[in-house]
Amino acid sequence: MNVALSSPVLVGRDDLLALASRRLAAAAEGGGELLFLAGEAGIGKTRLLGEVVRRARELGFTVVTAAASPGDAEIAAGLLGDLAGELGREPGTAGVGSRIAARLAAGGGDDGDSDRQRRLLVGDVSDLLESLGADRTLIALEDLHWADDVTLDVLGRLGRRAGTLKLLVVGTYRSDELYPRVPMRAWRTRLLTQRQAEEARLGRLSRADTAALSAAITGSALPGTVAEEVYARSDGIPLHVEEFVAAVGGMPDTLADAVLSRAEQLSREARSLAGVASVLGRSFDLDLLTAITGEGPAAVDDGLRELTERFFVQPRPDRVRYDFRHALIRDALYADLTPHRRRYLHARAAAAAVAAGFSPVFVSDQFERAAMPAGNWIGVVDLSVPRRALKALTIRACRVRAVV
């Protein structure tokens, strides 16, 4: 069966859409808040957040989105750095974005009191984000279960102040990944207990809703036995429904099998490009992707067009940034890379990111995933960056980490 994956309608989430609409209306009048969309992986948080973003834009909100990635919990202010970059891409928020980026690069100062440095950093970045609340603004953040302590402190402080601002902060997280040492676990409990945030939980689809979603994807109702098998295999998890319905050659056993089954139908060039993009995370930059592949722009454009048409990735409005349609799709493609291929691509990503002036946090993470500790960064093949510049970059990256 070869069908489109994306359902034209959002099934089984009417109550949550109504809640989000009420919160947007309140924020438009100066009564914002911090809202969590919670649920297990693949349950539809991304799709619901996308609908909230669409409605916010219709209401005249400025919308800024960012997402945490695996390993970000170990990188101080990692998600904030990505958010600063996204703010910098919007003309109306570029000034705030550049000031946040500069504040993060400066670190906590040199007075030796790490707690005071951290408090100052959190306060300064919170104040800058709070300034966005003068006009209607939606900050949409995905995968907060991977966020670091500094980022969460800033969001918590922002959430406490949002009630008097035209600012709605909506964050998603996987409720099945709040392990005991995950930074968000205690942070979330504290905010909800003190009524400084609100949480909406997404449940699994019923048998009837699963059948409705399958029919919306395929354009017609599935035969009863097939619909029942989809429900049994997917357990009512929307992403699983989409992938199982679209799988080629029979019903796969796992979501990863379903994703890789579809990936096998891609052209060789698009399949390779998907693997390269997966090393950059859930979101990736077009120019950085092109630099890593070594292919010409036309070849990359063709590959991205195919990946978009096959619902592996989706472009941002500026067509400069792309997102994997879901983090689990990216995870399946990333896990399919051989270990040495993965390290090689991370090393190329780090080198290209340095040359392009990407944040020290991103560069540091790529080098570490390439299994290249800080002492071995200098001298990377094809780095094309002066040793002095790389040394300064290393120092700045360590300074950001030292804030924790």
Image (spheres, grey):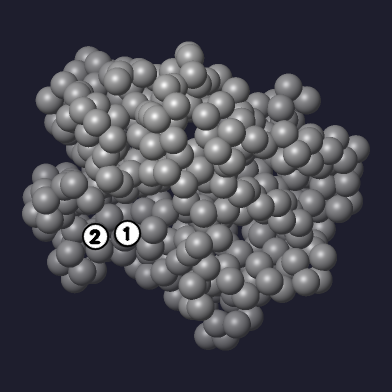
Kindly identify which numbered label has been placed on residue 369: 2
- In the image, residue 289 lies at what x, y percent? 27, 34
Choose between 63 and 271: the one closer to the eye.
271
Image quadrant for the N terminus?
Answer: top left
- Horizontal side of 18 relative to 302 (left or right) equals right
Kindly identify which numbered label has been placed on residue 67: none
The local crowd at label 1, few if under 14, some if 14 to 19, many if 20 or more residues have their Cα within 10 Å, is many
In the rendered image, the residue lying farthest to the front is: 225
- Horizontal side of 398 relative to 349 (left or right) equals right
- In the image, residue 137 lies at what x, y percent? 73, 38
| Above or below for 28 versus 189 | above
Residue under label 1: 365
Q: Residue at x 38, y 44 (%)?
A: 233
Asked if marks 1 and 2 touch (Cβ < 8 Å), the reply is yes
Q: Which residue is drawn at 66% across and 59% down?
A: 155
The local crowd at label 2, few if under 14, some if 14 to 19, many if 20 or more residues have their Cα within 10 Å, is some
- In the image, residue 355 lies at what x, y percent? 26, 43
- Horizontal side of 31 relative to 128 (left or right) equals right
| Above or below for 99 versus 295 | below
Q: Residue at x 41, y 69 (%)?
A: 74
| Above or below for 185 versus 162 | below
Choose between 176 and 76: the one closer to the eye.
176
Say which quarter of the image contains residue 304: top left
Q: Is residue 388 visible?
A: no
**Residue type for callout 2:** Arg
**Residue type for callout 1:** Asp
Q: Can residue 390 be seen in this view?
A: yes
Choose between 392 and 350: the one closer to the eye.
350
Q: Residue at x 65, y 62 (%)?
A: 154
How far is mark 1 from mark 2, CA to CA? Answer: 6 Å
Number of callouts in the render? Answer: 2
